[in-house]
Image (cartoon, rainbow, N blue to C red):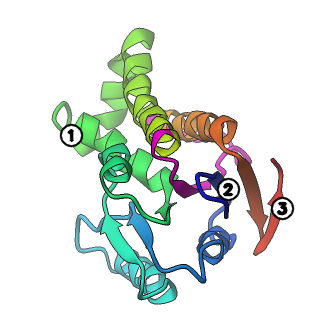
Amino acid sequence: MQQGELVLVLGGAKSGKSEFAEKLYAPQDNICYIATGVLQSSDPEMKLRILKHQQRRSSHWQTREQYQNIAQLISQKPRTGYILDDVTMAVTNVFYDLLKNKVKAKQIDDYLDSLSITDLNQLKSSILSQWQQLIEAQKLQHQSLVLVSNEVGLGIVPVTKQTRVLRDLYGEVNQVLAQAADIVYFVVSGIPLKIK
């Protein structure tokens, strides 16, 4: 990793993308690991996932469990580098944060169906702008940053409006990040392919 580089690591579920991203910084100490998979309920499967990630990363790294205000974190806490794992989970959490005051979880599809195209685009823009702010903060602070994200565009079209909106949003965020990134990797079955 070069100082100030923005690297995007894409891959499917259990593709090895997180492990690969962590190896980009393996010998360095002053790294901040931004874990966006914040446990918000008693979910044993999610607890196990988080534990595996915690055990695998360097004990010398600082871990921040957050998915909001990441641009501010990078602006205020200079480090040798940052790893954000993962973009998809952060987008999901922010999406539901924006909706939780407007609708109950069981009514999200109905709520999304009721939105005009303009309202839906405003929701998406609100989320996309947070990633643009992160890119700007990374460039301004000249911080090295590795972003890990799921490539979700290779599957079938989801059945529900909620999952279609999220799938499209993940793809749009990935496109914004890939355009801004200095290097993009696509990890398949543990094998990284440099695509940019």
Q: Residues within 10 Å of mark 1 (few under 14, many from 20)?
A: few
**Residue 49: quadrant of the picture:** bottom left
Q: Position of residue 133 (x, y in %)?
A: 42, 34
Q: Nearer the viewer, residue 74 or 42?
A: 74
- Rendered image: mark on residue 10: 2
Q: Which numbered mark, 1 or 2, is in the foreground of this view?
A: 2
Locate residue 78: give its quadrant.
bottom left
Query: What is the x, y in percent for residue 100?
Result: 21, 40
Residue under circle 3? 193
| Residue topped by disc 1 | 100
- Residue under the point 26% across and 42% down: 97
Pick whichever of labels 3 and 1 is earlier in the sequence: 1
Disc 3 residue crowd, few under 14, some 14–19, many 20+, Cα 10 Å: few
Number of the front mark, 3 or 1: 3
State the SS at label 3: strand
Residue drawn 30% across the image and 26% down it: 111
- The amino acid on which the numbered mark 3 sits, given as a three-letter code, is Leu
| Amino acid under disc 1 | Lys
Could you say which disc has been placed on residue 187 in the image?
none
Please, what is the three-letter code of the amino acid marked with disc 2? Leu
Q: How many marks?
A: 3
Crowd band around label 2 with a 10 angstrom C-alpha radius: few (<14), some (14–19), many (20+): many
Q: Answer whether residue 169 is magenta in the image.
A: no
Mark 2 or 3 closer to N-term?
2
Viewer-side residue, 46 vs 21: 21
Contact, CB < 8 Å: mark 2 with mark 3? Answer: no
Magenta stretch?
140-163
- Is 58 drawn above or below residue 121 in the view shown? below
Q: Secondary structure at mark 2?
A: strand
* In the image: residue 67, left or right of residue 103: right
